[in-house]
C-alpha cells in the first residue's frame, strides 16, 4: 500500500494482531520497524526473540498523537514541547523518564523510555489500530543493516512475524535522531536526519554523546544499542578518506591487490567518481551534491554486498555537515571504525 492509498482492511488486521500480542513489520519514514504492543511485556519479549537482540537493548515506543506521550512519561520537559512542535511527527526520538505504564521488558530494564511519533501515514494508522503504543526496533535481524524495503524485512524475519506491511522504499533510509532529555543538557545519542544544527535552532546548545564523536574512546554509549557492532556486512569494510585523487587511486590499488589474491571486491562511491573505479561490485550511493540520496541508499548497498559475496570492501568517506554525521556514524559502525587516510598511506602498505 502507499501513504496515499491506505488499505484499511490490512490496517485493521494489523491492529488485531498487535492487540493479540503478535508482531507486525511496518514502514516508517526512516526505516522499517518491527512492531509489538509496547505495554504488553510478552510482545516485547517476542520482539527480542524475533530479532535475536540482546534484551538489555531498549525499544522505542511509537505513538501517533502528542496527547499519548503524557501517560507513558513521568513529566514532559519544556524542551520536549519545543522539539515536538518543531519536528513531530517526524524522524526524531526523545528519551523521557518513564511512567509505570511502560513495562521494563520494553525499556530493557531502564527507568527511561524512548518515544517517537513517526510521520509515515501507514505507520500512524497502524499504531492507532494497534492501541496507540507500539514498541518497534528496526525490522532487521540483530547486527544487519536496518531494512529500507519490505523485502528486507522478509529476508530477516520471515516466519517470525505475523504480518509485513509493504509500504515501498522508505524516504530517509537512516534511523531517527535520538535526543536524551533526562540529563541536565539535551544530548544527541544517535545522529540522524534531524541534525545537531536543527536541534540547536530550537533548544540552543545541545551535547553529542562522546561515543559518537570518539567511538574508540572505550566509554560506554548512553543508548545501549549503540555499543553493538551494527550494520556489518559479511565482508571486511574500510572507509578511505583524503583528497578524491588519492582516495580513487588507493581504493583501486587495494582492490587490485585483493583481486590478485582471489578475493571478491566491492566499493561504495558516489556518482562523481563512479566511472573511475575497478572492482567486482561498484555501487554509487548517489551524488555528493545531495547527500540525502547517499543516506537513502547506504543500507541497501551494505545488504547487496552480502548477496554478492563481496569479501574486501571500501567506501568513500562522507565528511561534512547536515546528514553526513549520521551517514558516517552508520558507516563507521559497519566498518568496525576502520578508517584509512589515503593522503598518508598507500595500498602497498606504509606511508607515502
Ligand atoms: O527510526 C527509528 O528510530 C527506527 C524506526 C523503526 O522507528 N527504530 C529504531 O529502533 O531504530 P532500534 O531499536 O533499532 O534503535 C533504537 C535505539 C537503540 O540504540 C537503543 O539502545 C536506543 O534507541 N534506546 C531505546 N530506548 C532508549 C533509552 N531509554 N535510553 C537510551 N537509549 C535508548
Ligand atoms: Mg536497529
Image (cartoon, grey):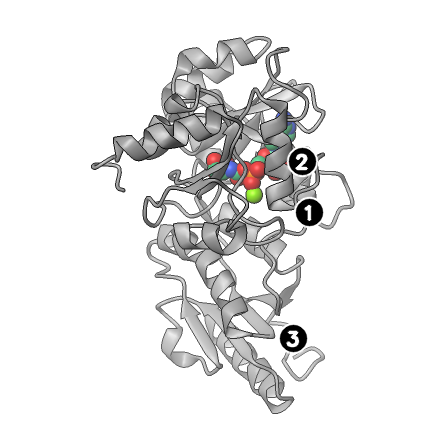
Q: Residues within 10 Å of mark 1 (few under 14, many from 20)?
A: few
Image quarter for residue 137? top right
The reply to whether the residue tagged 2 has its Cβ within 8 angstroms of ligand 1 is yes
When the figure is inspected, residue 2 is found, relative to residue 111, above or below; the finding is below
Q: Residue furthest bottom?
A: 260
Q: Which label sits on residue 345? A: 3
Q: Position of residue 17 (x, y in %)?
A: 45, 30
The image shows residue 164, relative to residue 96, as above or below, that is below
Q: SS of the residue at dot 1?
A: loop
103 sits left or right of 176 in the view: right
How many residues crowd mark 3 within 10 Å: few (<14), some (14–19), many (20+)?
Answer: some
Please name the residue that numbered disc 1 is placed on.
228
> Is mark 1 in CB contact (under 8 Å) with mark 2?
yes
Question: Can see residue 297?
Answer: yes
Q: Which quadrant holds residue 348?
A: bottom right
Which residue in the rendered view is the most extreme toward the left? 5
Quickly name the residue at label 2: 57
Queried on whether the Cβ of the residue with tag 1 lies below 8 angstroms from ligand 1, the answer reads yes
Amino acid at each position: 500500500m502507499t501513504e496515499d492509498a491506505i488499505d484499511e482492511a490490512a490496517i485493521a488486521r494489523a491492529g488485531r494482531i498487535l492487540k493479540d500480542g503478535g508482531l507486525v513489520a511496518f514502514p516508517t519514514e526512516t526505516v522499517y520497524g518491527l512492531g509489538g504492543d509496547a505495554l504488553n511485556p510478552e510482545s516485547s519479549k517476542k520482539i527480542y526473540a524475533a530479532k535475536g537482540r540482546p534484551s538489555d537493548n531498549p525499544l522505542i515506543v511509537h505513538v501517533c498523537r502528542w496527547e499519548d506521550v503524557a501517560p507513558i512519561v513521568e513529566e514532559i520537559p519544556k524542551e520536549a514541547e519545543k522539539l515536538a512542535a518543531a519536528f513531530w511527527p517526524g524522524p526524531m526520538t526523545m528519551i523521557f523518564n518513564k511512567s509505570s505504564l511502560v513495562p521494563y521488558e520494553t525499556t530493557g530494564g531502564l527507568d527511561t523510555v524512548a518515544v517517537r511519533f513517526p510521520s509515515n501515514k501507514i505507520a500512524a494508522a497502524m499504531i492507532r489500530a494497534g492501541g496507540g503504543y507500539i514498541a518497534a526496533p528496526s525490522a532487521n535481524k540483530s547486527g544487519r543493516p536496518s531494512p529500507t524495503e519490505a523485502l528486507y524485512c522478509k529476508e530477516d524475519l520471515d516466519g517470525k512475524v505475523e504480518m509485513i506491511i509493504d509500504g515501498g522504499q522508505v524516504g530517509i533510509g537512516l534511523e531517527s535522531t535520538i535526543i536524551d532529555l533526562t540529563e541536565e543538557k539535551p544530548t544527541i545519542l544517535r545522529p540522524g536526519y534531524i541534525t545537531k544544527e536543527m536541534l540547536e535552532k530550537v533548544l540552543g546548545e545541545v551535547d553529542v554523546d562522546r561515543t559518537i564523536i570518539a567511538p574508540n574512546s572505550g566509554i560506554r554509549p548512553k543508548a545501549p544499542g549503540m555499543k553493538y557492532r551494527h550494520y556489518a556486512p559479511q565482508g571486511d569494510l574500510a572507509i578511505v578518506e583524503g583528497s578524491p585523487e588519492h582516495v580513487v587511486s588507493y581504493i583501486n590499488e587495494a582492490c587490485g591487490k585483493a583481486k590478485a589474491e582471489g578475493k571478491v571486491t566491492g566499493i561504495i562511491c558516489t556518482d562523481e567518481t563512479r566511472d573511475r573505479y575497478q572492482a567486482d561490485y561498484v555501487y554509487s550511493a548517489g551524488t555528493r551534491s545531495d547527500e540525502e540520496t547517499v543516506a537513502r541508499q547506504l543500507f541497501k548497498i551494505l545488504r547487496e554486498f552480502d548477496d554478492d559475496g563481496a569479501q574486501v570492501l571500501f567506501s568513500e568517506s562522507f565528511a561534512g555537515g547536515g546528514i553526513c554525521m549520521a551517514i558516517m556514524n552508520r558507516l563507521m559502525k559497519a566498518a568496525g571504525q576502520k578508517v584509512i587516510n589515503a593522503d598518508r598511506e598507500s595500498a602497498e602498505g606504509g606511508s607515502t
